[in-house]
Amino acid sequence: MASKRNAPPADVSKDQDALSLLMADHKRVATLFAEFDKLKEDGSDDDKSAVVQRICQELSVHCELEEGIFYPAVRKAIDDKELMDESLIEHAGATDLVAQLEAADPEDDLYDAKVTVLAEQVDHHVQKEEKAMFPQAKRSGVDTMALGAKMLARKVELLARSRPPVAASAGSKAKGR
């Protein structure tokens, strides 16, 4: 049962290229931010916390894949140092907010604001990647299939480490609240 939980998301296939994998991540996180938006007004703290935990996990894994595998390959292939540098700085800002949210409770005064700002930053970053970086990577001849395979293998590894087994997850949640 735990192995299914640690499997890659259903929208990821083994023959998927890096760009498709990253865009699927973008879509999944946008859906989670929309889900949080609906909970801001009348959602329970537990529901908000659960969505934010998923957002933080998705973004942490996504950033590690981009910074560790995708960006180095693209940086070598395209002549746009500014775009690549800005992307790393945007990741640093998002990573800082993720860390703040992981340490926060939904009752905290700035919790909702932090999630909203993170969503805005991520949306800006996604637009820049999908409209500027990804087309340049495609034109450059980067082997996105090989990168995708490498990224998928790493993603499975990261998810296996970051997700507790299902039984432990249910028990620890009950104890933590």
Image (cartoon, rainbow, N blue to C red):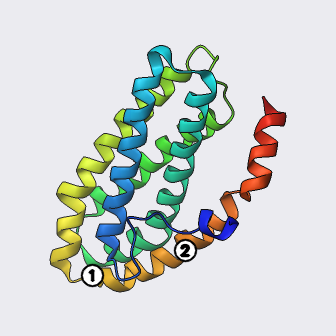
Residue 86 seen in this snapshot: no
Q: Position of residue 165 (x, y in %)?
A: 74, 59
Q: Secondary structure at mark 2?
A: helix
What residue would you read off at disc 1?
142
Asked whether the residues under the numbered discs 2 and 1 touch, taking CB atoms below 8 Å apart as contact, a structural biologist would say: no
**136 relative position to 86: left or right:** left
Count of numbered tags: 2
The three-letter code of the residue at mark 2 reads Arg
Q: Position of residue 39 (x, y in %)?
A: 47, 24
Position of 99 relative to 41 (above/below): below
Q: Nearer the viewer, residue 105 or 97?
A: 105
Q: Residue at x 29, y 69 (%)?
A: 19
Closer to the chain start, of discs 2 and 1, is: 1
Q: Residue at x 68, y 66 (%)?
A: 1
Q: Please name which of the two marks, 2 or 1, marks the residue nearer to the observer.
A: 2
Residue that protrudes farthest toward the front in the picture: 1
For the C terminus, which image quadrant?
top right
What residue would you read off at disc 2?
154
Position of 23 relative to 19 (above/below): above
Q: Residue at x 35, y 53 (%)?
A: 26
Q: Nearer the viewer, residue 121 or 49?
A: 49
Q: Position of residue 113 (x, y in %)?
A: 47, 21
The three-letter code of the residue at mark 1 reads Val
**39 relative position to 98: left or right:** left
Q: Position of residue 8 (x, y in %)?
A: 51, 68
Q: Residue at x 61, y 62 (%)?
A: 5
Q: Count neighbours of disc 2 (C-alpha within 10 A) and say few if under 14, some if 14 to 19, many if 20 or more.
A: some
Give me the C-alpha separation between circle 2 and circle 1: 19 Å
**161 relative position to 26: left or right:** right
Q: Count neighbours of disc 1 (C-alpha within 10 A) and say few if under 14, some if 14 to 19, many if 20 or more.
A: some
